[in-house]
């Protein structure tokens, strides 16, 4: 059988090993070190944001942002429903209440109108939300400007979950830099990887300093171990950060590769009825994953195509199952439009790695065409 074609595989650029070798040579194996500082600097420079903390995961970054905003038991936090569970789980870590907001059709991301309706309802009941977690799914810029205007009107901070959106911009501004906090992920399947990691960014120095403090067990300034607050072990290691420094050098190229995967699929598959998510005016997606939508004329289901492609060792996956449909979040209050549920039913994510070869892409398209006609 042919070599497996993955949905989104790690893709090293070549220089990663140089930073790891340097860490070995200097014995900078212990958690922190120059690669961590260097990687934070790279993230800041790339996104044109003054402060970044390198962390153990994107989930940790979201969790710390909620802690820094003072989210506590029974507080309300509004979040995109169409996302990966890691967006919403940290709300529950804080024993707060997630309120799930459905998507709009244009960008598949959080619907600003539904959000405002939800905020009004909760404000009327004396439960003003403590934060909004806004996700740019699949690297596609959502309506963050509209959401920001609403958030400012009601004075609610935004955590921008750009875990899938590093390298994407809206009107030239990097995603993750619109909110009070921005979150990136360097998990193995993301646009670049540190084998596992994340970052929290902000314009506010105090917040990022405090995030670093909390992420290293909240040690007070004393010669002995003294703690006045509950801490976490959420920092990125110097080895992982070394991989990150190498990956930052190829980020723009990997974005171009993913965008060209998407262009290829949409050129080849639009003629057989598949629909694709388009970029709105001013939006530049990193096209982390290329997704196709089946239409009414198709006589097969996405799941049938997924199983068919699996026979040729081609990995595909349904779109994210919305949080309001998840067993664990089924009792959460949700404001629904039907958009994310529809996308979940009609969509399939195709192999989207930045290392995908032309031959592999051609094979994917050929097998899809064979099956659909
Ligand atoms: C991957 C992801 C996260 C979590 O990042 P980790 O680094 O895996 O913890 C959060 N939100 C979204 C939308 C993601 O895709």
Image: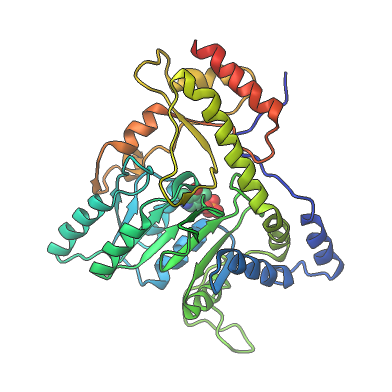
How many marks can you see? 0
Q: Residue at x 52, y 53 (%)?
A: 168
Q: Is residue 182 above or below residue 191?
A: below
Q: Is residue 334 above or below residue 303?
A: below
State which quarter of the image contains the N terminus: top right
> 366 above or below 331?
above
Q: Could you tell me residue 265's position as x and y percent?
A: 55, 29
Could you say which is closer to the camera, residue 100 or residue 171? Answer: 171
Where does the image place residue 305, in percent across and percent down from the top left? 50, 19
Whether residue 195 appears in this view of the structure is: no
- Furthest toward the right, the residue is 25
Q: Taking 43 as reference, is 152 left or right?
A: left
Query: How is the rendered protein coloured?
Result: rainbow
Q: Residue furthest left?
A: 124
Q: Please state which of residues 239 and 192 is positioned toward the viewer in this rendering.
A: 192
Res 351 visible: yes
| Residue name at image x 31 percent, y 43 percent | 104
Q: Residue furthest bottom?
A: 222
Question: For the view shown, which residue lies furthest in the front direction?
Answer: 281
The answer to which quarter of the image holds residue 351 is top right
Q: At 55% from the left edge and 54% from the top edge, which residue is drawn?
A: 166
């Amino acid at each position: 059988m042919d070599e497996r074609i993955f949905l989104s595989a790690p893709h090293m650029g070549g220089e990663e090993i140089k930073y790891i070798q340097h860490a070995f040579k200097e014995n900078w194996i212990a958690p922190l070190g120059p690669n961590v500082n260097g990687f934070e600097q790279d993230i800041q420079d790339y996104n044109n944001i003054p402060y970044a903390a390198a962390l153990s995961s994107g989930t940790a970054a979201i969790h710390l942002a909620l802690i820094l905003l003072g989210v506590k038991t029974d507080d309300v936090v509004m979040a995109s429903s169409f996302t990966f569970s890691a967006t919403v789980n940290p709300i529950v870590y804080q024993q707060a209440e997630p309120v799930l907001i459905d998507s709009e059709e244009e960008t598949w991301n959080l619907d600003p109108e539904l959000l405002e309706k939800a905020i009004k309802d909760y404000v009327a009941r004396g439960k003003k939300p403590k934060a909004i977690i806004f996700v740019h799914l699949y690297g596609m810029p959502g309506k963050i400007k509209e959401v920001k205007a609403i958030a400012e009107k009601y004075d609610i901070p935004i955590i921008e979950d750009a875990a899938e959106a590093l390298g994407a911009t809206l009107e030239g501004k990097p995603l993750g830099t619109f909110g009070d906090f921005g979150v990136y992920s360097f998990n193995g399947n993301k646009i670049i990887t540190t084998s596992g990691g994340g970052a929290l960014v902000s314009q506010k120095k105090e917040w990022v300093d405090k995030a670093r403090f909390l992420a290293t067990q909240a040690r007070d300034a004393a010669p002995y171990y003294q703690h006045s607050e509950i801490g976490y072990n959420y920092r990125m290691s110097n080895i992982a950060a070394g991989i990150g420094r190498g990956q930052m050098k190829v980020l723009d190229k990997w974005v171009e590769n993913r965008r060209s995967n998407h262009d290829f699929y949409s050129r080849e598959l639009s003629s057989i009825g598949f629909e694709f998510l388009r970029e709105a005016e001013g939006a530049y997606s990193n096209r982390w994953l290329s997704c196709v939508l089946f239409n009414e004329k198709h006589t097969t289901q996405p799941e049938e195509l997924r199983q068919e492609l699996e026979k040729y060792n081609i990995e595909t996956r349904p779109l994210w199952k919305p949080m309001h449909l998840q067993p664990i979040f089924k009792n959460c209050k949700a404001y629904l439009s039907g958009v994310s549920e529809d996308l979940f039913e009609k969509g399939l994510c195709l192999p989207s790695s930045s290392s995908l070869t032309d031959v592999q892409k051609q094979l994917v398209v050929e097998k899809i065409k064979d099956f659909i006609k």
